[in-house]
Image (cartoon, rainbow, N blue to C red):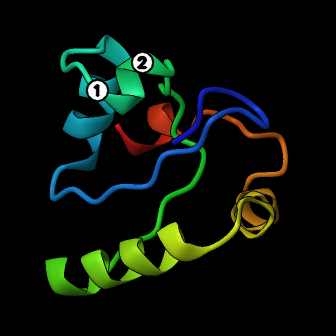
Amino acid sequence: MASGKRGTLYIGVTSNLAQRVWQHKQQLYEGFTAKYVINQLVYVEQASDMEAAIKREKQLKKWNRAWKIQLIENHNPHWKDLYPDIL
């Protein structure tokens, strides 16, 4: 997720993507995403199970910002909010 093109980035895992993105968009919980108004889903990966998802999350969080931006732009060059596409 991101606060906008070239904005603050957030990486997380969930078992219910649509619900979790909606929660971020509504700023239902205090924390990082509410503080930085991170409310756009700009990249998604699906994992075979939660263990694999957490492993990938940890890997991506270790990447530098440029690598994360390149990953997003390879799949979503205009940084379109993908939330409507997952509903």
Up-down: is 68 above or below 57?
Answer: above
Q: Which mark is residue 51?
A: none
Q: Amino acid at mark 2?
A: Lys
- Are the residues tagged 1 and 2 within 8 Å (C-beta)? yes
Q: CA distance from mark 1 to mark 2?
A: 6 Å
Residue 59 drawn at (x, y percent): 47, 81
Around disc 2, counting alpha carbons within 10 Å, would you say few (fewer than 14), some (14 to 19), or many (20 or more)?
A: few
Up-down: is 7 above or below 10?
Answer: above
Residue 55 drawn at (x, y percent): 32, 84
Residue at 46 percent across and 35 percent down: it is 83
Helix, strand or loop status at disc 2: helix
Up-down: is 42 above or below 63?
Answer: above
Up-down: is 8 above or below 66?
Answer: above
Q: Which residue is disc 1 drawn over?
A: 31
Question: Going by the image, does 4 lie left or right of 25?
Answer: right
Question: Going by the image, does 48 lie left or right of 58?
Answer: left
Residue 23 drawn at (x, y percent): 24, 25
Q: Amino acid at mark 1?
A: Gly
Q: Which residue is disc 2 drawn over?
A: 35
Residue 44 drawn at (x, y percent): 49, 59
Helix, strand or loop status at disc 1: loop
Around disc 1, counting alpha carbons within 10 Å, would you say few (fewer than 14), some (14 to 19), or many (20 or more)?
A: few
Viewer-side residue, 47 vs 3: 3
Residue at 74 percent across and 52 percent down: it is 76
Residue at 57 percent across and 54 percent down: it is 43
Q: Quadrant of the C terminus?
A: top left
Residue at 84 percent across and 50 percent down: it is 77
Quadrant of the image occupied by residue 74: bottom right
Quadrant of the image occupied by residue 86: top left
Question: Going by the image, does 7 lie left or right of 34?
Answer: right
Callout count: 2
